[in-house]
Image (tube, grey):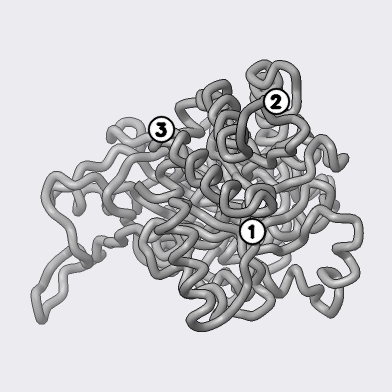
């Protein structure tokens, strides 16, 4: 299993984003004849008490290396004690190029048995690529560290170095290969990296002994799906009198903070996206005739979004969050406005994309569905806006006629004009990023529309629903 698969399975099984750091200190080790035995016994005890409380373990190479060959053997022994289904994130912070980087990678994966490692990106992609050659492995790049003097280097430049790292590293691998280290003590940077990298995993050290706030870190760094953030804690667990109780208390605190942070994150994401859509001209007010023939004082045109890369990225991130809890073999975009969005979403998720044509081709294969699929596969519909639901129903009929199984549709905006009810009657569950009421309220709160425009649109919607 890959690092990501192991970790997400452990997260779901243990209901935990807690990563226990293994940073042994000699004065806290059990008595024994030799340092190897003492280190091994200490690590095994920590693991035995916390294996059902964590999402991964993070042994720190330096704390074992300082004990010489015996310490390194103890590290190997300790990693062997970690259950196979729990991933090992080896904290080595390597950074070199060429054959040296390849040697470091071989040691981390083949000698020590790590599933993931921490790396310093200062030398660029040459120092990173050897760690990505083995399938299923993951790296966490130092982006903005939790130490007090981090700003001296990591804030330098315009944009600051940590932002450049976050942007550049996304071209080095996908979200299952590249993660970032951003300190829980650096909340502005944590929030910024989450904005730049909406679906990457972030390792956020600094909670507890270094003064980082758990709740604030969750608010700044968590994804809307309640994942994406790993909380590593060492001293707050491993040196406590009751290790198991300390780990469990942290796990519960994370769960409690997560519920609050996730709710706030979803509200913030919707509001930010609504404002961005308005600023790009994708939401307009006036007198419009919709594709359904209905008259409307508000028009949502997401075709314009393709000219705004940052907006497309935000929209795609919102779709990805919706898709996280849906089972499917293919994403099926509804032509035509949803096609470019679906392509970006499918690429980001490394998912298969198909789409039904509105009319069969009169040349070539004359097929009605583009893409590769098999009868019996599950597909999830992806549409931009749902009004009456007619375009979605038409797409569903074409897809189902080819033997595809479809029970879910994701949409950026539900105009709440009967589309949801029509889809439900056709056996589809509609999952909107936001409703038109959410959109209007966000624009009013941000003072982007006046009271008259807001109430006019709401009265129009109320009239449609009442009719």
Of labels 3 and 2, earlier in sequence is 2
- How many circles with numbers are drawn on the protein? 3
Residue 150: percent from the left, percent from the top?
85, 63
Check disc 1 and report its element: helix, strand or loop.
Answer: strand
At label 1, counting other C-alpha atoms closer than 10 Å, the crowd grade (few under 14, some 14-19, many 20 or more) is many
At label 3, counting other C-alpha atoms closer than 10 Å, the crowd grade (few under 14, some 14-19, many 20 or more) is some
Q: Residue at x 54, y 60 (%)?
A: 139
Locate residue 215: give its quadrant: top right
Residue 219, above or below 252: below
Distance between the alpha carbons at the discs numbered 3 and 2: 43 Å
Locate residue 95: give its quadrant: bottom right
Residue 99, above or below 278: below
Q: Residue at x 40, y 58 (%)?
A: 110
Q: Residue at x 33, y 54 (%)?
A: 331
Of labels 1 and 3, earlier in sequence is 1
Residue 76, above or below 42: below
At label 2, counting other C-alpha atoms closer than 10 Å, the crowd grade (few under 14, some 14-19, many 20 or more) is many
Q: Tell me if label 1 and label 2 are in contact, CB under 8 Å.
A: no
Instruction: Check residue 250 in the rendering and tell me which mark sits there, or answer none.
Output: 2
Q: Nearer the viewer, residue 385 or 271?
A: 271
Provide the residue designation for mark 3. 421
């Amino acid at each position: 299993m890959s690092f990501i698969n192991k970790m997400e399975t452990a997260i779901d099984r243990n209901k935990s984003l807690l990563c226990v750091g293994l940073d042994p200190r000699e004065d806290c080790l059990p008595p024994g004849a030799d340092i190897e035995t003492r280190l091994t016994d200490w690590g095994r005890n920590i693991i035995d008490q916390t294996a059902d409380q964590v999402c991964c373990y993070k042994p720190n190479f330096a704390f074992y290396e300082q004990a010489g060959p015996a310490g390194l053997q103890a590290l190997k022994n300790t990693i062997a004690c970690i259950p196979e289904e729990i991933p090992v994130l080896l904290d080595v912070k390597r950074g070199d190029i060429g054959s040296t980087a390849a040697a470091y990678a071989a040691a981390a994966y083949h000698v020590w048995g790590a599933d993931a490692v921490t790396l310093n990106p200062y030398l660029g992609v040459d120092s990173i690529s050897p760690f990505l050659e083995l399938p299923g492995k993951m790296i966490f790049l130092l982006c903005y560290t939790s130490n007090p003097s981090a700003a001296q280097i990591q804030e330098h430049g315009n944009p600051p170095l940590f932002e450049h790292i976050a942007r550049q590293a996304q071209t080095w691998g996908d979200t299952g290969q590249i993660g970032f280290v951003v300190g829980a003590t650096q909340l502005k940077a944590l929030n910024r990296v989450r904005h730049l990298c909406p679906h990457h995993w972030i390792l956020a050290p600094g909670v507890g002994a270094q003064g980082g706030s758990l709740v604030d870190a969750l608010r700044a760094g968590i994804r809307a799906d309640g994942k994406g953030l790993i909380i590593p804690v060492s001293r707050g667990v491993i040196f406590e009198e009751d290790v198991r109780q300390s780990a469990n208390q942290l796990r519960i605190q994370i769960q409690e903070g997560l519920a609050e942070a996730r709710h706030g994150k979803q509200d913030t994401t919707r509001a930010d996206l609504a404002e961005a859509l308005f600023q790009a001209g994708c939401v307009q007010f006036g007198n419009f005739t919709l594709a359904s023939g209905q008259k409307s004082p508000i028009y949502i045109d997401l075709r314009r979004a393709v000219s705004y890369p940052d907006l497309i990225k935000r929209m795609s991130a919102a779709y990805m969050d919706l898709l996280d809890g849906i089972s499917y073999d293919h994403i099926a975009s509804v032509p035509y406005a949803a096609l470019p969005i679906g392509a970006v979403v499918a690429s980001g998720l490394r998912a298969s994309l198909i789409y039904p044509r509105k009319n069969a081709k009169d040349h070539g294969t004359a097929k009605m569905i583009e893409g590769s699929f098999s009868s019996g596969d599950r597909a999830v519909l992806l549409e931009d806006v749902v009004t009456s639901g007619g375009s979605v129903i038409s797409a569903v009929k074409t897809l189902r006629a080819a033997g595809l199984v479809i029970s879910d549709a994701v949409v950026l905006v539900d105009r709440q004009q009967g589309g949801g009810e029509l889809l439900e009657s056709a056996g589809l569950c509609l999952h909107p990023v936001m409703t038109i009421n959410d959109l209007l309220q966000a624009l009013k709160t941000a003072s982007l529309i006046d009271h008259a425009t807001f109430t006019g649109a709401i009265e129009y919607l109320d009239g449609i629903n009442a009719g």
